[in-house]
């Protein structure tokens, strides 16, 4: 049996083993990165839920805040000066929350299906006259990317500026 001129030196074998080791290491790192990304997305969403729960608690656990929020949403002109201030601060918190959601979505930390649910809820909020009025007066305070998204996807045509 003639094996020809094929022979491997110790150095050649060592190089092959090192190459296989690098490939295995890269596969392991990829698996770890994927698991880490899932963990980060999970923690991000948990944080989102916690922040929204705080906003909801500010409204739902204080009957005066609930009254102001309801009245501000439906009839913003009926609010007294101090009530209007409280309403603006509540709505500002809500829009800060949605801007953060949009940022998380754009940076792939919030899945499309979750973002669509929140985006639909934002559309509903913008149906309220007081919320639409807040946005019209204060939308410029938010990032250009978020403003463009709201204009393109969430506002009724008569509310687009």
Image: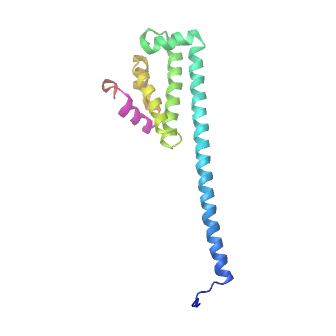
Residue at the (51%, 11%) spot, across then down: 68
Q: Provide the residue span drawn in magenta.
A: 143-155
Is 114 on the left-hand or right-hand side of 27? left
- Residue found at the very far front of the displayed protein: 1
Residue located 39% across and 17% down the image: 129
Along the horizontal axis of the image, is 108 left or right of 151? right
Residue 21, horizontal then vertical, whole percent: 65, 67
Q: Relative to 94, does residue 20 appear above or below in the rendering?
A: below
Residue drawn at the location 59% of the way across and 24% of the way down:
53
**How is colour applied across the structure in the image?**
rainbow
The dominant secondary structure in magenta is helix
Q: Is residue 33 magenta?
A: no
| Outermost residue toward the left in this view | 157
Residue 146 included in the magenta stretch of the image: yes
Image quadrant in which the N terminus is located: bottom right
Q: Nearer the viewer, residue 20 or 74?
A: 20
Give coordinates of residue 145: x percent, y percent.
43, 39
């Amino acid at each position: 049996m003639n094996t020809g001129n094929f022979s491997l030196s110790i150095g050649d074998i060592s190089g092959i083993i090192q190459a296989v080791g690098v490939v295995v290491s890269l596969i392991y790192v990829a698996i770890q990165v994927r698991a880490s990304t899932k963990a980060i997305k999970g923690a991000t969403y948990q944080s989102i839920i916690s922040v929204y729960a705080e906003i909801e608690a500010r409204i739902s656990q204080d009957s005066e805040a609930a009254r102001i929020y309801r009245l501000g949403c439906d009839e913003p002109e009926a609010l007294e000066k101090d009530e209007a201030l409280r309403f603006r601060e509540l709505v500002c918190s809500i829009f800060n929350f949605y801007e953060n959601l949009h940022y998380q979505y754009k940076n792939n930390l919030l899945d499309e299906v979750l973002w669509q649910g929140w985006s639909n809820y934002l559309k509903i909020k913008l149906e309220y006259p007081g919320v639409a009025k807040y946005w019209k007066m204060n939308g410029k305070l938010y990032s250009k990317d978020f403003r463009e998204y709201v204009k393109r996807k969430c506002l009724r045509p008569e509310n687009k500026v």
